Amino acid sequence: MDINVRSGDTIWYYSNLFNVPLKLIIDSNPQVNPSALAIGQIIKIPGYQVSSYKIQANDTFWKIATERRIAVDSLALLNPTVNPRRLQIGQSIRIPVKVTYRVVDGNQAYDYQVLTGHLNKLFEIYPFIRNETIGQSVMGKNLDELQIGRGSKIVHWNGSFHGNEWITTAVIMQFLNDYLLALTNKESIRGLDVGPFYDQVTLSIVPMVDPDGVNLVLNGPPEGEFGQEALRINQGSTDFSGWKANIRGVDLNNQYPAKWDVEAARKPKEPAFRDFPGYQPLTEPEAIAMAELAGERLFEKMLAFHTQGEVIYWGYEGLEPPRAMTIVNEFGRVSGYEPIRYVDSYAGYKDWFVKVYRQPGFTVELGEGVNPLPLSQFDEIYQETIGIFLASMYM
């Protein structure tokens, strides 16, 4: 919600007027000097939207504000040209509405278009979210990284490394919405005050690593050469439900130089709907973007969300730090998932991250069944995962 500064207004006053944490207003206006507001300057207030209201008989600003449990001065601020003593029946005024509801519904077929629509809504309501395009997919879709928070501890989450595991993006996005709601409304999640997390942690989130693959699974092959090649790789079948790879038939989570040669020796030798590690490591733009991001951000811990199995893989060749065990045990406690240290599978993002940075990295396998998991599991998976999201910030 945008407002215009009046004489005497301060950021501190807006924080009290709208009951929004001061730090969130400051971070929503990075180009503004909080100590030197200028009359007429536009300030973004997070956690609010504006609705239109037509004046009815006997209405006053006080009556309208009382009915909506908002401050009278918030109406004056949003309606600077309206004389509150001379309201006219039918006259339109602007009313601030605090957002106390989700705008993200994860329980749906969650393709790139749905993601983009939800991101745009979140950026509008919560302008303290920082967004950076870290690369593009093979077909040119933006790979977005979101950053939330001020902390020196950078915690990374990602989803949909595999096309038919798109439900991971939906889970991440719904929790992100709940976290933003809790921050702006000064609420807790599962009894935890999340306000301190904002000061202690910077979340780095890439919600959809493989947008081309996700769209292929959910919407079928696109027109043109990429769609034709995908059909060829899929042996002419239009059923792409088993497709794990990117649009070129490369498994993005087999693309990393962490025993890549071991995987290459026993996996498909040419593009396939799953498991082909590429002709060499880090050939695909999506995998390269994620590797570069890790180098730039230097995550304190990294969580890659996949499906399925209700397990959490956390080790690589003994290079994982000792505290990784403490963290994964907490993940297991709050989710009911089983921690597994080693598995005969390599070249994944988690493996490479642990190998290169010697920090805790986790592959979290949500749900149980056959990918893509049905949406009938969404609510259960979401409830299981909330504790992992929270624990990743407080551990």
Image (cartoon, helix red, strand yellow):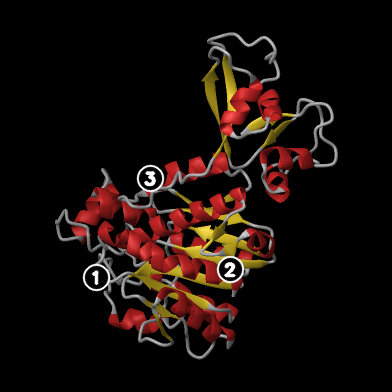
Tell me whether circle 2 and circle 1 mark residues in contact (CB < 8 Å): no
Vertical comparison of 144 with 386: above or below:
above
At 53% from the left edge and 10% from the top edge, which residue is drawn? Answer: 90
Furthest-bottom residue in this view: 318
Can the viewer see residue 257 in this picture?
Answer: no
- As helix, strand or loop, the secondary structure at mark 1 comes to loop
Horizontal arrangement in the rendering, residue 31 relative to residue 240 (left or right): right
At 83% from the left edge and 26% from the top edge, which residue is drawn? Answer: 7
- As measured in the structure, the alpha-carbon distance from the residue carrying label 3 to the one carrying label 1 is 24 Å
- Name the disc covering residue 369, or none: 1
- Name the disc covering residue 114, or none: 3
At 73% from the left edge and 38% from the top edge, which residue is drawn? Answer: 14
Horizontal arrangement in the rendering, residue 395 relative to residue 6 (left or right): left
Query: Could you say which is closer to the camera, residue 56 or residue 92?
Result: 56
Residue type indicated by callout 1: Gly
Tell me whether circle 2 and circle 3 mark residues in contact (CB < 8 Å): no
Q: Residue at label 2?
A: 393
Q: Quadrant of residue 209?
A: bottom left
Please identify the quadrant where the C terminus is shown: bottom right
Q: Across the whole image, how many numbered discs are drawn on residues?
A: 3
Q: Earlier in the sequence, mark 2 or mark 1?
A: 1
